[in-house]
Image (cartoon, grey):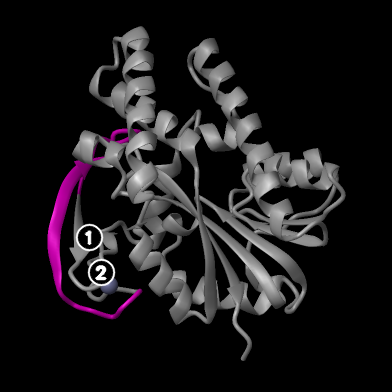
Amino acid sequence: MEEVLSCPVCNSVNFEIHLKCHDHALTNELFTLKQCTQCSLVITSPRPVENDLSRYYNFSNYISHTGKTDSPFTSWLYKSARSIMLQRKYSIIRKVCSNGRILDVGCGTGEFLNTMQNRGWEVVGVEPSSAARTKAETLLKKQLFSAVDVLPEDSYDVITLWHVLEHIAEINEVIAKVRGLLKPKGLLFIAVPNYQAYDAQKYGNTWAGYDVPRHLWHFTKNSMIRFLENNQFKPLHIIPMKLDAYYVSLLSEKFLNPDKPVTNYLRALYSGALSNFKARKTSNYSSLIFLAQVKPE
Ligand SMILES: [Zn+2]
C-alpha cells in the first residue's frame, strides 16, 4: 500500500478524512478516503501499489468488460441502459463535432467506438486489459492499442475518457499526453462519478460510485475544472449522465440488501429519480461529463 502525500490537482498537503469504505464489489477490504481541503478532490489513500492493483480487477463478471451479470433481468437492464447511453454519448458529441477521428481511452469491449464507427467516424481505441481489447478488436475489425504512448501527436478531433480517469494513478501525465494527441482546438470528454450528488450522500460509504480501490480519485465539479485548467484545457460544458443515478443506486442497494432484488429495483428507481430531481438545482448529478477544449499555446 502507498499513501498519496499531495493532491495531484492543487498540490496541497492538507487533507481530512472523508470516510472509510469497503470494496463491496470484490474483496470487502476497507479503504480510507481523504479529502483535499483546498480543491475538494477525494483520494483513496493509502492505495494498493500499481503491481497489486490488478487483483482488484479480477472479476469473473466485471460487467463493463464482459457484458455478463448473474441475473437475466439485470443483464437485459444493463444492455438496454448501455444502448441508451451509447446513443446519448453520440448525440452529445455530434452537437459539437459532426465527424472526424476519435480516440477512446479505456475503450473496454469497444461498444462506444462501434457506435461512432457505424456513424462514419474514424475510430481509435486504447484498452490496457488484453481480454477486453481482443473483443473490441473483433467488434471493430481493427487493431487497438494497450497504451496512449505509441499514438501520433496532433491527430485526434475528439478524445473520450468515459469513467476512466478515476482508475488512472498518474492523471497529470496521462492528461498531458492526451492533450498532445489532440489537434489544435481538439475536444476532450471526461466522465466521472460525482460524490457531491444526492445518491452519494444518501448511500454514504456504500455508494457504488466510490468503488474502492479501483477508483483512486473522486472528483467534484470544482476539482475537475481546476484539473482541466491546470493542464491547458478550457472547460466548456458540464453535462449530466442521468441514467447513472439509477444504475449506481441499484448497485448500492445490492450491497446493502443482497437478497432483496425486487425491493432493490424499486428503491433504486426512487433514489435515482430523487437524485436527478435535486440535481436540477445544484447540477450535482451522480455522474458528470466534462467537455473541454485544448487552449492555444
Ligand atoms: Zn487539491
Span of residues in magenta:
9-31
User: Which residue type does callout 2 highlight?
Assistant: Val
In the rendered image, residue 108, in percent from the top left (x then y), is placed at 62, 45
Ligand 1, image quadrant it occupies: bottom left
Residue 170 seen in the current view = no
- Rendered residue at 28%/26% (across/down): 255
Q: Earlier in the sequence, mark 2 or mark 1?
A: 2
Is 136 situated left or right of 100 in this image?
left
Quarter placement of the N terminus? bottom left
- Front residue of 19/45: it is 19
Direction from residue 244 to residue 206 in the image, left or right: left
> Alpha-carbon distance for marks 2 and 1?
6 Å
Picture mark count:
2
Going by the numbered disc 1, the residue's amino acid type is Pro
Mark 2, residue position: 4
Task: Spot the residue most to the left.
Answer: 16
Residue placed under numbered mark 1 in the picture: 46
Q: Residue at x 75, y 67 (%)?
A: 157
Residue 147 pos. (x, y %): 63, 64
Whether label 2 touches label 1, CB < 8 Å = yes
Q: Is residue 175 above or below residue 117?
A: below
Residue 77 quadrant: top right
